[in-house]
Amino acid sequence: MTQRIALVTGGSRGLGKNAALKLAAKGTDILLTYHSNRQAALDVVAEIEQKGVKAAALALNVGDSTTFDAFASEVAQVLSQKWGRTTFDYLLNNAGIGLNAPFAETSEAQFDELMNIQFKGPFFLTQRLLPLLQDGGVSSMSPAAWRALPCRAMRPTPR
């Protein structure tokens, strides 16, 4: 059986890191993304590799869909070089942001940024990565979806 590979967006910290480590502990190789902290991502890669599976990290701004073609090319290159494969098995859309502004004070710019990162980005990233996704699965998570904050309906809404 071929080794399973999961691509985890936002895998360098928080829920994404925990998901990546849990998948790695179950024997799944991990390709994780990070937004700006390369060192944190490399630390997670090292932690994953200590579990006896392969891992790699790529930079990705989920809020900028104009970068997705180049990102997909990078993914294909890493899959080929590190795994000798052309596809991966699972996509976990986890990267996201929180908006702690009160609902009544949320600006249009804040709303647009949130929608780009929480909804538009994962939608078009998934669409762009479909040719590289083996008949596996796609999951999108939002760590704040389970709890309500008074007057702050912006985080869980898009997902």
Image (tube, grey):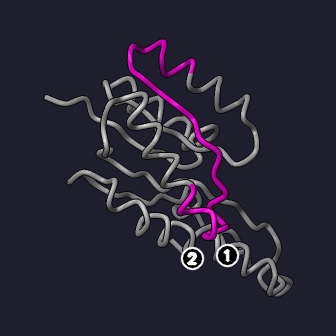
Image: 124 above or below 14: below
Image: 100 above or below 32: below
Is residue 134 found left or right of 78 in the rendered image?
left
The structure residue drawn at horizontal position 55% and vertical position 18%, both measured from the top left corner, is 47
Asked if the residue at tag 2 contacts the one at tag 1, i.e. Cβ–Cβ closer than 8 Å, the answer is yes
The structure residue drawn at horizontal position 63% and vertical position 59%, both measured from the top left corner, is 96
The structure residue drawn at horizontal position 48% and vertical position 56%, both measured from the top left corner, is 93
> Residue tagged by mark 1?
154
Query: Which quadrant of the structure image shows residue 37?
Result: top right
Asked whether 66 falls inside the magenta stretch, the response is yes
The percent coordinates of residue 62 (x first, y second) are: 62, 61
Q: Secondary structure at mark 1?
A: loop
Q: Secondary structure at mark 2?
A: loop
Query: How many neighbours does mark 2 have within 10 angstroms: few (below 14), some (14-19), or many (20 or more)?
Result: some
Query: Which quadrant of the structure image shows residue 151?
Result: bottom right
The percent coordinates of residue 40 (x first, y second) are: 70, 30
Quadrant occupied by the N terminus: top left
Is residue 131 found left or right of 49 in the rendered image?
left
The structure residue drawn at horizontal position 25% and vertical position 29%, both measured from the top left corner, is 3
Which three-letter amino acid code belongs to the residue tagged 2? Thr
Mark 1 → mark 2, Cα distance in angstroms: 6 Å
Image: 49 above or below 82: above
The percent coordinates of residue 45 (x first, y second) are: 56, 25
> Residue tagged by mark 2?
157
Q: What's the magenta region?
A: 46-70
Asked whether 54 falls inside the magenta stretch, the response is yes
* Front-lying residue, 155 or 108: 108
Is residue 37 found left or right of 158 in the rendered image?
right
* Front-lying residue, 75 or 64: 75
The percent coordinates of residue 81 (x first, y second) are: 42, 30
